[in-house]
Amino acid sequence: MLMDLFRELLADRRSTRLLAQARRSFQAGALDEAERICAACTKAAPHLADCHYLRGLIALKREQPALAVPHLKAAAELNDAEPSFHVALGETLQDLGAHEAAAAHLARALELVPADDPARPELMLRLAGSLQERGQFAEAERLIRDLLSVAPDRSEALLRLASIRFYESDAEQARTVMDSYVTARPGGGPRLRRALMLPVILQSNEEIDAVRRRFDSDLDRLLEERLAPIGHPESEVGLTPFYLAYHGRNNRALLRKVGRVCRALYPARSDCPRRPFAWGKRVRVGFVSTFFFKHSVGRTTFGLIRDLPREHFEVFVFAVDPKEDEIAAEIRGAADHYTALPAELDRVRAAVEAAALDVLLFADIGMHPLTTFLSLWRLAPVQLVTWGHSVTSGIDTVDHYVSSDVVEAQGSEDQYTEKLIRLPGYFMPRYHRPVLDAPRKSREHLGLPTNRHLYYCPQNLFKLHPDFDSALAAILELDPRSEIVLMNSRASWMEQVRRRLGRSLGTAASRVRFLPRVPQNDFLQYIAAADVVIDPFYFGGCNSSCEALSLAVPVVTLPAFQLPGRFTLGLYREIELDACVARSEREFVEISVRLGTDPDYRRSISGQIAERCERLFERPDTGLALGEALLRMAEAAR
C-alpha cells in the first residue's frame, strides 16, 4: 500500500511538471506541443482537472469548439467548485447552440462567482442569452433587471432587455428601453433597431394603422439625419421589418423606404464590374440563406438547388450558420459547390464575391438581418429573391422577385419593388411528402375532446390578423359543437391573443383551445386529428397546407390579394379542387362549418384530396421553370 501511495505521489509530481510545461507551450502558441504534453499528462493523471481544462482551451484556440467540450466537461466534473471551468464550458456550449446545457453551467458559475467579481455582469448576460434561447423569457428578464439594478447604464443589458420585451410583443416598453440604449450607444444602428421594433401581436386595425404611421415617421427621421455609417449591421441593427408582412397591407412603399434607410446607414457597393452569362460557359448561380436546414425555407428551396439543369448551370450554395439535419444534408448533396459560413456578414460577402457568380438568389430577404443587409451589395450582375419570406425586399440591388403565375393575383406587380417573374406551372419545388411516423393517434391520446368538431389553425399566432376574429366568431356561432384550435407559439403572445379574442368572441372565447408547440411528427398527428384546417386571412399556410393535404385533411382558404395569402389556393389549383376555396368571408365560414358538421361531405372531400394530393410532391417543375427563365435572361444579355 505504501508503494502504491509512493507511485501515486511520483505520478502527481510528474503530471504537475508536465502541466506547467504544457502551459508554457500554450502561452508560446505551440499548440501541437502543448496538446502532446497534455495527452501524456492526462494519461498519467486522469484526475487532474487543470489538464483537461487546458486541453479544452487548446481546442478552442484551434477553433474546434466541439472537440473542446468533452475536455471542459471532464474538468468541470472533476472540480465542480472552479467557476472558470463552468464558464468556459457554458460559453462553448452556448456558441454551439446547446443552450440547455450552457444555461446549467453558466448558472453554476454564477453561484460560485463572488458578487463583487468584475466578470459577473458578463456572466449574467451570457446566462440570460441562453435562457432566452430556451424560451425562459421571464427568468432571462429577471436576471437582466437584477443586473440593471446595480448597473443601470450597462448598455448590453439594456439591449438584451429591449430584445426580450420586443419578442414578448411589448413594443412600447422595448422602445422605451431602447431610448436608454441609444443614449448610451448613439448611432444609426441602434436608432434603426428601435424603429424596427414593431408589435408582434396586434389588437385591431386601428393599432396596425397607428404602428405603420409611426414606423413611416421613424424612417423619415432616419433619412433626414446624418448618422455615422454602420460597420456590422447584422449585430448593430440585428432586426428586419419582418412583422410588416402580417399587417394585411401592401408593403411596397414602406419596404422601399426601409431599403433607402438601410443603404443610407450601410453604404454597400451597388454596382458590379462583371458582365453576366459568358458564352460557352455554364451559368453560375448562387443560393444564400441562414435557413438551409429543416426549416420552411430549406424545404421549399431545396428543389430549386436540386433541379436546375446542370448542363446549363453550375450551382453554388452558401449556407450561413447551418444546422446538421436531413434537409441540410440534401441541400449539401444537391449543390455543385457548398460553403458553410459563420453568421458574419463580411465573411459571407467575401465568399460570395469570390465565386464570381452570374446570378445570386436570396431565398428569404427579410427573415434574417444578415441576408437582408447582404442583399444591399451587388454581388452578382443579376440578383433575385424568392418567397422564403413572401413579400418584396424593397432593396434596389435586387432585380427580380421569383414567384409563380398560379399564385400571383392579376396586377400584383404593384406589390413589388423588383421585376416580378411569374414562373409557369406548379410552384412547390421538389417538396417532400410529409408522412406520419406512426399510426394516427386518437384524440384521447392527444388530449383533444372527442365530442367536438375541431377547426385547427396551425399557424404562428402573429399570422392571426384581427380581421380573422369575425370568421372565428361566426364558426363558433353556427356550430355549437365547434372548438377552435390554435397553436401556442409563446405564452405572452397567447395571452395577448386571448385578450383580443375575449373582446371579439365574447363568451364563445372559452371554446378556443391552444395546443403546445411540439416536434414535427406530433404536429402532424394534431393535424390528422382535426376535422378541418382553416387558413388565416391575408397570410395563410404553405408548408402546413401541404402537410394537411398530404393527410387528406381539408384546408379552407379565402385567397388574399397578395402572395402570402394565396399558397393554399395554388395547391388546390394543382389538384383541380375548388370546394374549399372561398370567395368571401361568409363563404369561408359556410364551407368550414359544412365540413366540420357533415361527416359524409367531409369524407367525400377528403377522399378527393387523398386521390389527387400526390401531384403536390417531389415535382421538378419549378426548378426547371426557373432554369428556363434564367436561360432567357442569358440569351437576351448575350
Image: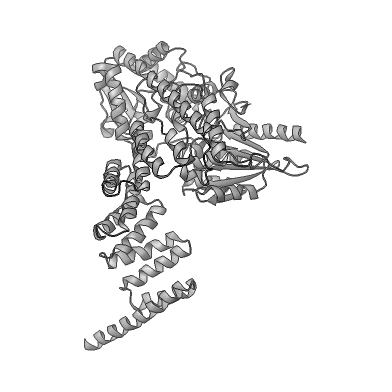
**Residue 438 appears in the rendering:** no
Q: Quadrant of the N terminus?
A: bottom left
Find residue 233 and report its horizontal and vertical position in percent: 50, 43
Residue 180 or residue 254, whichever sits in front: 180
Where on the picture, by quarter, is residue 4?
bottom left
Q: Quadrant of the C terminus?
A: top right
Q: Is residue 226 above or below residue 72?
A: above
Task: Determine the image quadrant of residue 18.
Answer: bottom left
287 horizontally vs 537: left or right: right
Q: Seen from this angle, which residue lies furthest bottom?
A: 3
567 lies above or below 47 = above
> Which residue reaches farthest left?
1
Q: Position of residue 35 (x, y in %)?
A: 44, 72
Q: Which residue occupies 33% across, 27% down?
A: 486
Residue displayed at 78% across by 43% down: 280
Is 162 in front, or is 368? Answer: 162
Residue 252, position as x, y percentages in the image: 54, 25
